[in-house]
Image (spheres, rainbow, N blue to C red):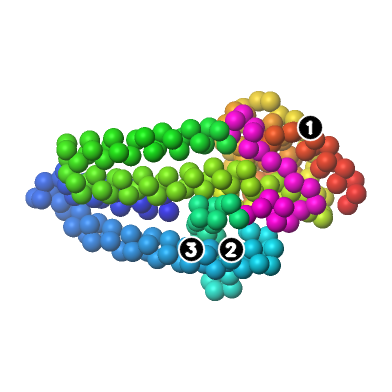
Amino acid sequence: MKTAILCCTSVFIGSLIIPEQNKVIFHFLESGRYFVLAIILVLEVTALVTVCLAVQASLVNKEDPDLAVANPIEKIFGSSLFSSILSIEGRVWSFALFASQIKSSAYRGDQHFFYDKKDGAQSNLFGFILLIIIEIPLVHLLLHFLWSSIAANITTGLTLFGLIFFLAEYKAVGKRPISIHGINLIIRYGLYAPLTIPLKNVSEISLNNSFVKRSRNVKRFNYFGVPNVAIKLCSPINGKTKIYLGVNSPEDFITTVNRAKIAV
């Protein structure tokens, strides 16, 4: 989604600065950008309508908020990449619009763990939100007077969209827990899609205090600092053999997971 928006913005900027006689391919790109923007608009509207209906139903039935968003989408579009994208958009709008009505206790799980205070994750996200709010009018005026009103409006619109995402992420960090649910460990982190790990598939769980590099077989769930929990899997999940987490109370989390493993 972000890539598509950035590409459309690049085409728009290119159409303004590249001389008309040198626009060999840009005529086709300029036409295509409207098609891409239309698709993005359809996705956003679909996600927004689904969220409004799904969250309302979940509040009445006390359903898991993740399932309240994902189930209606999968009933219509099936289980696919398109459904996954819509589910992410659905979570964005659900927390942007209805965060005060979403309770952590509504999520599936016998025990919940959080990560909002780990290295000041939620506070730092709030700082980013304030910076974006301060930046919007300044950049808008700068572009308006030094470039054009169209460029200023488009940039402001894209920045506002990013602000909605950051606001939803900020609210989700304090609401969506990492949970032990029966025989599974469910990792919910911010607006990320939930990752379900069978407890029997956990080979080892331990403390971590070192930087974790990007790798094909590693999945990281952490905002700031270094992850403080390392999980080694018996069998890969989506090609990942190691999961690294940042949580508020790593020792308690590790102890609880080990006890749950023994009980399975």
Q: Amino acid at mark 3?
A: Ala
Instruction: Indicate which disc, 2 or 1, sits on the residue closer to the N terminus.
Output: 2
With 21 as the anchor, is 73 left or right in this view?
right
Which region of the structure is painted magenta? Answer: 102-121
Which residue, as the protein is rendered here, is positioned at the far right? 263
Which residue, as the protein is rendered here, is positioned at the far bottom? 76
* Rendered residue at 79%/32% (across/down): 251
Please tell me which residue lies in front, 170 or 202. 170
Per the image, label 2 sits on a secondary structure element best described as helix
* Quadrant in the rendering for residue 107: bottom right
Residue 260, image x, y percentages = 85, 46
The residue beneath circle 3 is 47
Mark 2 closeness class: few <14, some 14–19, many ≥20 residues within 10 Å: many
Q: Which mark is residue 251?
A: 1
Magenta-drawn stretch contains 69: no
Please tell me which residue lies in front, 130 or 189. 130
Q: Is residue 225 above or below residue 115?
A: above
The residue beneath circle 2 is 55
Q: Amino acid at mark 2?
A: Val
Which residue, as the protein is rendered here, is positioned at the far top? 210
The mark lying in front, picked from 2 and 3, is: 2
* Rendered residue at 29%/45% (across/down): 155
* Rendered residue at 69%/36% (across/down): 247
Residue 228, image x, y percentages = 69, 31
Q: Which mark is residue 83?
A: none
Mark 1 closeness class: few <14, some 14–19, many ≥20 residues within 10 Å: few
Labelled pair 2, 3 in contact (Cβ < 8 Å): no
